[in-house]
Every structure is written in C-alpha cells, then in structure tokens.
C-alpha cells in the first residue's frame, strides 16, 4: 500500500478555510479552534477525526503549545516575525513586504536579527508528545519545518532580487549570510532532535529552490553556494537521528535532484507536476531507486 499523508507538515496539509469547508462537507462538525501551523500560509493541523476519515499514516510532532513566537503587530494587518521580516495580509495568506537586510553590508551582519533556537520554552512538552505517539500508536512520526533553509532564508532576509545579485556581485556577503542562516538551521535541529530524535521517522527541512520553469539558480551555482551547506545541514541531522531526511521544494527542481541525493536528501516533496521537467514517470525511472517522492503528483 502507498502511505497517505495529510497534515504531518505545514506544506503537506490543508489551509484553514479549505479545512473548515471540508469538515462541513464530510459532516464532521466544526473544529472550534483550528491549530494554525503557519500564520503566513494559514495552514493547519487537522483534527484526528479527519485524519481517520482519510486513513492517514503519519502524525506530526507539533510545536510546543506553550511557545509563542515574538512578533510585532502593525495596524495595517501586517506583522514583523522573529527575523524582523514584515508580512502583510494578501487574500488568504501573508506576503513579505519588508526584507530587513535589503540594504545591509557585510559589516552589518553581526547585528542582524535571527530567531533564537535555544530560547527557553521553544520545545517544552514536545518530547513527552513524541514519546507518547511512539509508544501508543503505529503511525510514522514527523517533525518538520522548524528551520528555514539557507537559500530561502537568505532570499527572505535580503529580498530575492538582491540576494540573487549578491551571488554574482557580492559573493563575500552572500557566503557570510548563507553561513549565518546555516548556523541558525543547525541550532534549531540541535535543540529539536535532542528532544525527539529517537522517536521520529521523518525530519522535514524546507528550502524552496524551484520556479515554474526551472531552479532559481543554475545547477553550477547551487553546487558552489548551496549544496555544501545542504550537505552540512543534512549530515548534522543524520548525526542526531535515524529518521529519514525530507526536503520540501516547490517548482521545477529536476536539474538539482542528483545533487539533492548527493547532499543527503532521502525524500523530496512535493512533486509539482505542473512545473517544467517534473513528469512523474520520468522522475520515478531516473531517481526512484535513490529518493522517495512524497506528496503532490496531481497539481498545486
């Protein structure tokens, strides 16, 4: 049987409005307080009754219910997150409208705002949650998306256009920022896997590298700037847990898949078949023996 996932990560789940409508359609009754995983995407952890309805085989280790990320709310329905990125409401989701490092220099980087992975309370209760699921259920357990990937985080802090220019025009800055984002990601996995590494079967790391037509950067630039840091990140994760490593990247990433495998990625999600070169049969024939394809496969 093919395992079924819905709701084990913020990217393999359902958005809040769709979730509310689906519960009504299935006559499950309202969820009085949907658990929003990601405010920007408005994605939720579905309740158990809906997971049973679809015979879902995975369960998430949810973030600490006592932890509230430091944000600064603004009067125009926007907010600043833990990295000082400003997000503004755009229909059903939030878009980035301010990038805190857009005008920074190499000398400014030590003063940049990063979330503290070791902040007290961030992982409170997650060990007990993971251990209970491990000992009392037969679901595969997933911990995911607690750290931004180096490429996506640099683009978000700097602005996509500016960071892509940096990779050509200011490589010292680009590499310094990549190193800081890598350090941040490793810190998050250090603190999380110390708590749940022995109980989970899948560890999910996001780093969106694809557009509709191909990767954001050439395979050559990926190998120079991103792949060594991906390898360091996935090697660290593998040193802390026996869980399989999952990389989330939307879009057309066909040209990067051999490098993902070489960097230690064991699962790729989603399979966005509407993007260039992402033909399901071709992906399975060429890479199926080396990597698992998770989610997607219909359309996004």
Image (cartoon, rainbow, N blue to C red):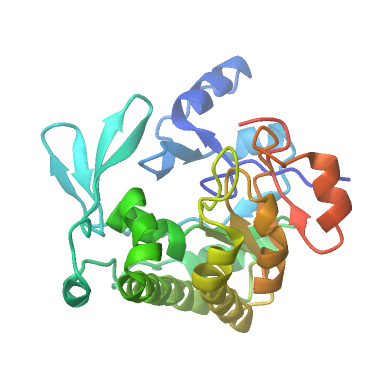
Q: Residue at x 29, y 66 (%)?
A: 115
x and y, in percent, of residue 233 in the image: 53, 75
Q: Residue at x 29, y 57 (%)?
A: 157
x and y, in percent, of residue 65 in the image: 38, 55
281 vs 214, nearest the viewer: 214
Q: In this view, does 142 lie to the left or right of 20?
A: right
In the displayed orientation, state which residue is furthest to the bottom.
239
Q: Is residue 65 visible?
A: no
Q: Is residue 11 visible?
A: yes
x and y, in percent, of residue 10 in the image: 51, 46
Quarter holding the C terminus?
Answer: top right
Figure disc tally: 0
Q: Which residue is drawn at 18% across and 58% down?
A: 103
Quarter holding the N terminus?
Answer: top right
Q: Quadrant of residue 50?
A: top right
Q: In which quarter of the image is residue 56?
A: top right
x and y, in percent, of residue 207 in the image: 51, 57
Q: Is residue 233 left or right of residue 160?
A: right
In the displayed orientation, state which residue is furthest to the front.
169
The correct choice, above or below, for 25 with respect to 291 in the image is above
The correct choice, above or below, for 43 with respect to 262 in the image is above
In the displayed orientation, state which residue is furthest to the left.
75
The correct choice, above or below, for 287 with respect to 89 in the image is below
């Amino acid at each position: 049987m093919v395992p079924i996932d819905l709701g084990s990560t913020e990217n393999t789940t359902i958005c809040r409005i769709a979730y509310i409508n689906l519960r009504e359609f299935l006559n499950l009754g309202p969820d009085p307080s949907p658990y929003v995983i990601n405010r920007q995407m408005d994605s939720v952890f579905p309740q158990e009754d809906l997971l049973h309805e679809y015979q879902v085989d995975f369960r998430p280790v949810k973030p600490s219910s006592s932890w509230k990320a430091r944000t600064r709310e603004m009067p125009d329905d926007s907010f600043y997150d833990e990295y000082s990125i400003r997000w503004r409401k755009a229909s059903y989701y939030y878009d980035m409208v301010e990038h805190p490092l857009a005008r920074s220099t190499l000398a400014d980087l030590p003063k940049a705002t990063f979330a503290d992975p070791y902040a007290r309370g961030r992982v409170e209760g997650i060990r007990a949650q993971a251990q209970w699921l491990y000992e009392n259920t037969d679901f595969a357990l997933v911990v995911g998306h607690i750290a931004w990937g180096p490429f996506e985080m640099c683009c978000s802090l700097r602005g996509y256009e500016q960071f892509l220019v940096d990779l050509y025009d200011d490589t010292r800055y680009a590499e310094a920022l990549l190193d800081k984002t890598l350090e941040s990601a490793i810190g998050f996995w250090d603190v999380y896997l110390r708590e749940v590494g022995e109980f989970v079967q899948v560890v999910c790391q996001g780093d969106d590298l694809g557009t509709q037509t191909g990767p954001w950067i050439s395979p050559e630039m990926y190998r120079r700037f991103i792949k060594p840091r991906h390898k360091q990140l996935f090697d660290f994760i593998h040193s802390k847990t026996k869980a399989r490593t999952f990389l989330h990247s939307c879009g057309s990433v066909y040209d990067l898949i051999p490098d993902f495998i070489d960097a230690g990625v064991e699962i790729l999600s989603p399979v966005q078949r509407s993007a260039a070169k992402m033909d399901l049969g071709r992906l399975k024939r060429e890479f199926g023996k080396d990597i698992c394809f998770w989610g997607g496969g219909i359309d996004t």
